[in-house]
């Protein structure tokens, strides 16, 4: 079975260089790295291209925009590593990746969010965008930390710690993490359950004194980020990343 690793983050957070280190020191076997077509960049991909037993391919959304198109062939080897489109909605991409994993019978081993600390600290409104990514993540990597205070990083992590998020936070230094194997370990630490086989009965809170009087359908509760209104709009609105990137550009100026 192919193990699937998903990497979320903004366009310039340094995912490719970090990925190269993680794959080289944390994964065994043949690896295919699928990079979102709009993010292909030969110069930036050099670190990945030099990793042994690693092939780089593109992915994109299909014509209807709801499913992922990998092109041919589909055989990813032992590991399929997905680099999402940093300028697109992360929730839409996670939903499509969950469907892809189910269709191809891939095992979702790890979901990682890479946080560009310079970007996040300069654009406070990005907190809700990162919150959406971290909701689906097992590990959060803090990168681009030069000039960022320890207090800011502590404040960034505090809401997740207070809300008992199981994900771990790791520091990136010179594109490397202390323990690549720990970052990629196959033990789910994410809030979401969309990648797991769910039994609707597990979501129910019935006991002998609290039984329904009418027949009911056994349907698992949707992930909160996938819940929609009657009009089809998502109930939790994630900020548009384009607006956040524009705000960052303005802050830099």
Image (cartoon, rainbow, N blue to C red):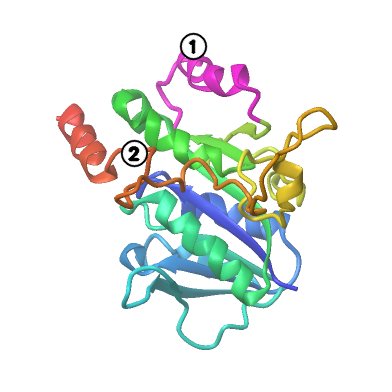
Element on which disc 1 rests: helix
Report the residue marked by disc 1.
Answer: 151
Q: Position of residue 205 (x, y in %)?
A: 74, 34
Element on which disc 2 rests: loop
Q: Quadrant of the N terminus?
A: bottom right
At x 52% / y 43%, what residue is drawn? 113
Crowd rating for badge 2 (residues with CA inside 10 Å; few <14, some 14–19, many 20+): few
Mark 2 to mark 1: distance in Å?
28 Å
Task: Choose between 232 and 123: the one closer to the eye.
Answer: 232
Q: Quadrant of the C terminus?
A: top left
Eye-nearest disc, 2 or 1: 2
Please indicate, yes or no, whether residue 175 appears anywhere in the rendered image. no
Residue stretch in magenta: 144-165
At x 36% / y 67%, what residue is drawn? 40
Q: Position of residue 18 (x, y in %)?
A: 54, 49
At x 59% / y 46%, what residue is drawn? 221
Q: Answer whether residue 151 is magenta in the image.
A: yes
Report the residue marked by disc 2.
Answer: 237
Task: Choose between 123 and 14: the one closer to the eye.
Answer: 123
Whether 238 is drawn above or below 155: the answer is: below
């Amino acid at each position: 079975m192919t193990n699937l690793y998903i990497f979320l983050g903004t366009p310039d957070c340094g995912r490719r260089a970090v990925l190269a280190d993680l794959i080289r020191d944390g994964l065994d076997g043949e690896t295919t790295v699928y990079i979102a077509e709009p993010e292909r960049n030969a110069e930036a991909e050099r670190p990945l291209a030099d990793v042994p037993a690693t092939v780089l391919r593109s992915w994109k959304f299909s014509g209807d925009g709801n499913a992922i198109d990998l092109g041919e062939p589909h055989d990813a080897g032992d590991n399929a590593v997905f680099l999402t489109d940093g300028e697109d909605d992360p929730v839409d991409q996670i939903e499509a990746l969950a469907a892809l994993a189910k269709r191809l019978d891939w095992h979702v081993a790890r979901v990682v969010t890479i946080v560009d600390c310079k970007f996040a600290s300069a654009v406070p409104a990005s907190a809700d965008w990162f919150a959406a990514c971290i909701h689906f993540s097992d590990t959060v990597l803090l990168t681009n930390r030069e000039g960022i205070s320890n207090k800011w990083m502590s404040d960034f992590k505090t809401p997740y710690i207070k809300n008992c998020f199981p994900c771990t936070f790791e520091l990136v230094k010179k594109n490397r993490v202390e323990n690549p194997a720990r970052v990629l370990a196959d033990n789910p630490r994410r809030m979401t359950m969309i990648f797991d086989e769910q039994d609707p009965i597990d979501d129910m809170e019935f006991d002998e004194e609290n039984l329904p009087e009418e027949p009911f359908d056994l349907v698992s509760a949707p992930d909160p980020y996938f819940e929609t209104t009657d009009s089809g709009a998502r109930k939790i609105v994630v900020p548009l990343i384009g607006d956040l990137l524009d705000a960052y550009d303005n802050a830099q100026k």
